[in-house]
Image (spheres, rainbow, N blue to C red):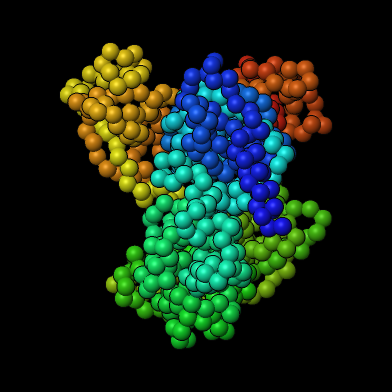
């Protein structure tokens, strides 16, 4: 019966990987790759055209509610200079993404979203939803996967977007851990954890049971050992291989097994949940970190007991998490993040004290609607934010019928009759060393000034980025074009020959990532093309993606504050035109209709309601942002 299930799983895998047989007619199609997006599984597969083998396979998040169109598309030429480059601003949703490659109209492959043009600001919600439909229609990817498509899949690459109808959770689980790339040094079969010569998919018995038990103690295996080498075991081995910096096959060779059972084995810092009853090196490492933070005074005995539970609860209370005493992967990462932050600021020698302060708070008690918090104590003043039943605020002062409060990070005024006051003990951990201090938690002064945010809120963007931005630390080879003169450009050619067609002229000083080398020539990507540069005019160097500013990025830091945003009216499915309203309400007066492809100026967008205020031929009105394709005025 188990063998039958295995065959079924492999059949499902084959169906998902082959895209249900949808392949281009190779005689008429000569680009290096074609792409199949399977919306059923949220998987993107890049195939090599020459033999149909898989070049790369990755998990994605496509559109919610069937917002991603199915069909066959061919990637168009760039409409904006910042397409296929490091940063791309999506004005319709006020977010940044990396390596946006247009599929069709306003639909792109691009990275998970960022709140600002900053690698540490990945949107936590987008990261949490990764692998399930979550976008407005674009296809979200890990950063390096988005970069691969931008650099390797040329203008004209075919994209088939389908619904295979066959769910493959085994493959999804593997791709959630890491994408497959033919450049990683393992075959696609090995990526699936299949090997005839080592412990791998399908193995069973006492040897597998011992391996699972050891992986659990190291913090990589999160379920009860059962002696069967299946997806959970493959995932655990892949995670350990990742920490070792070796190819992530999920296969346990004899050499790897020796490392796993040695004292040199890596210990996870947040792969699986640990809690009361857990034990082993992963708990010992965690106890040590809690002790360094000054919140655990028990023995370093590798046992997650009641003392560890109390320490975790204390940290959870300070940082704004549910106080359950359970060390989820996020909570473990929080502990190591806070310890690293303190040691970076103060060094390894520091003292810790618990500081308790009383703070006046209030809870919103009005049930019927949201209540405005205003800039001044009158109903005609600007609304800063709104509160709902159960929301809590810091109370700064009370005068007559108004209360001055801090709500959602903003200081303003609201009617005191809608608030029920209470007093809370504000509790922080204060670390002092080298004449400086740093806290975990917000001091009363920070809360009163409105500058404080919960440690949870501050940490979650970092945590989201850390999960999907590992590539930032990886050394990569780059070149700088050096023609010897500022105005002298270097030809990029279609092949590694001085007789080949010139695809582009690259300015002196341009920095490019090395894709491949061929004799005296180097293969690079520039704009939306890939070609060859002669090594004679190149300077080679090692760096990381975080160190390199993309030379094709058309927007400087802060440009979003000054640049004008425009939008193109998208076609309405019924009659090709879209209504414009006098107010941000479909029940308000309709003041006109605009045909598709008309360009309008965007005066503002309300992300909560989905309405945009626009200007067209000196007339202003409101349109729903779903009917607009936004662009920067560059």
Residue 37 visible in the picture? no
Nearest the camera: 97 or 71?
Answer: 71
Quarter of the figure with the N terminus = bottom right
Q: Position of residue 421 (x, y in %)?
A: 69, 71
Q: Residue at x 73, y 54 (%)?
A: 371
Q: Residue at x 61, y 35 (%)?
A: 18
Snapshot quadrant of residue 147: top left
Nearest the camera: 6 or 619?
Answer: 6
Nearest the camera: 467 or 614?
Answer: 467
Note whether 272 is above or below 149 in the view shown: below
Snapshot quadrant of residue 592: top right
Q: Residue at x 54, y 67 (%)?
A: 208
**Number of callouts:** 0
Q: Residue at x 43, y 24 (%)?
A: 528
Residue 415 visible in the picture? yes
Snapshot quadrant of residue 585: top right
Q: Position of residue 429 (x, y in %)?
A: 46, 75
Note whether 103 is above or below 386 in the view shown: above
Q: Which residue reaches farthest left?
A: 484
Q: Position of residue 582 (x, y in %)?
A: 74, 27
Note whether 273 is above or below 59 in the view shown: below
In the visual, does 124 lie left or right of 487? right
Note whether 422 is above or below 252 in the view shown: below
Nearest the camera: 438 or 271?
Answer: 271
In the visual, does 421 lie left or right of 96? right
Q: Position of residue 437 (x, y in %)?
A: 37, 71
């Amino acid at each position: 019966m188990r063998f039958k299930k295995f065959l079924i799983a492999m059949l499902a895998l084959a169906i998902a990987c082959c895209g249900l047989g949808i392949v281009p007619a190779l005689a008429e199609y000569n680009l290096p790759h074609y792409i199949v997006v399977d919306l059923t599984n949220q998987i993107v597969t890049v195939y090599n055209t020459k033999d149909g083998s898989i070049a790369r396979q990755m998990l994605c998040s496509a559109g919610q509610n069937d917002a991603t169109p199915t069909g066959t598309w061919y990637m168009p030429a760039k409409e904006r200079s910042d397409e296929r480059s490091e940063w791309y601003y999506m004005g319709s949703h006020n977010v940044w993404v990396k390596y946006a490659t247009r599929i069709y109209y306003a639909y792109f492959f691009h990275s998970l979203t960022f709140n600002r043009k900053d690698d540490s600001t990945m949107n936590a919600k987008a990261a949490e939803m990764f692998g399930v439909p979550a976008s407005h229609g674009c296809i979200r990817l890990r950063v390096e996967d988005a970069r691969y498509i931008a650099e390797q899949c040329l203008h004209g690459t075919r994209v088939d977007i389908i619904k295979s109808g066959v769910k493959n959770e085994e493959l999804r689980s593997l791709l959630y851990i890491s994408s497959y790339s033919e450049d990683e040094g393992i075959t696609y079969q090995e990526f699936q954890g299949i090997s005839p010569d080592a412990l791998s998919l399908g193995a069973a018995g006492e040897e597998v049971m011992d391996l699972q038990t050891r992986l659990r103690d190291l913090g990589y295996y999160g379920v009860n050992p059962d002696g069967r080498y299946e997806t959970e075991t493959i995932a655990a081995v892949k995670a350990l291989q990742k920490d070792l910096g070796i190819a992530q096959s999920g296969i346990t060779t004899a050499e790897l097994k020796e490392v796993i059972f040695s004292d040199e084995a890596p210990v996870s810092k947040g792969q699986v949940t640990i809690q009361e009853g857990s034990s082993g090196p992963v708990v010992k490492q965690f106890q040590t970190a809690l002790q360094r933070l000054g919140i655990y005074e028990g023995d370093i005995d590798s046992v997650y007991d009641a003392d560890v539970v109390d320490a975790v609860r204390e940290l959870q209370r300070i940082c704004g998490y549910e106080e359950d005493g359970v060390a989820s992967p996020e909570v473990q990462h929080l502990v190591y993040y806070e310890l690293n932050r303190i040691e970076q600021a103060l060094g390894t020698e520091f003292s810790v004290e618990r500081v308790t302060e009383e703070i006046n708070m209030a809870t919103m008690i009005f049930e019927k609607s949201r209540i405005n918090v205003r800039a001044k104590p009158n109903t005609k003043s600007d609304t800063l934010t709104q509160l709902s039943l159960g929301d809590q605020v810091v109370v700064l002062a009370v005068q007559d019928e108004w209360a001055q409060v801090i709500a959602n990070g903003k200081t303003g005024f609201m009617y005191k009759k809608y608030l029920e006051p209470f007093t809370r003990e504000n509790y922080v951990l204060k670390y002092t060393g080298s004449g400086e201090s740093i806290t975990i938690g917000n001091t009363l002064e920070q809360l009163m000034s409105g500058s404080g945010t919960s440690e949870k809120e501050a940490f979650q963007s970092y945590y989201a980025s850390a999960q999907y931005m590992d590539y930032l630390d990886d050394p990569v080879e780059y070149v700088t074009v050096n023609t010897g003169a500022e105005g002298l450009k270097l030809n990029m050619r279609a092949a590694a020959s001085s007789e080949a067609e010139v695809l582009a002229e690259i300015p002196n000083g341009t920095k490019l990532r090395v894709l491949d080398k061929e004799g005296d020539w180097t293969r690079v990507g520039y704009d939306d093309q890939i070609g060859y540069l002669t090594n004679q005019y190149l300077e080679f160097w090692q760096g990381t993606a975080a160190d390199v500013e993309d030379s094709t990025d058309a927007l400087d830091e802060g440009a979003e504050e000054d640049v004008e945003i425009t939008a193109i009216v998208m076609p309405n499915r019924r009659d090709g035109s879209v209504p414009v309203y006098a107010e941000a309400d479909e029940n308000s007066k309709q003041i006109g209709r605009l045909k598709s492809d008309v360009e309008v100026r965007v005066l503002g967008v309300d992300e909560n309601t989905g309405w945009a205020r626009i200007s067209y031929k000196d007339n202003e009105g409101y349109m729903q942002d779903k009917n607009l394709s936004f662009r920067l005025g560059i």
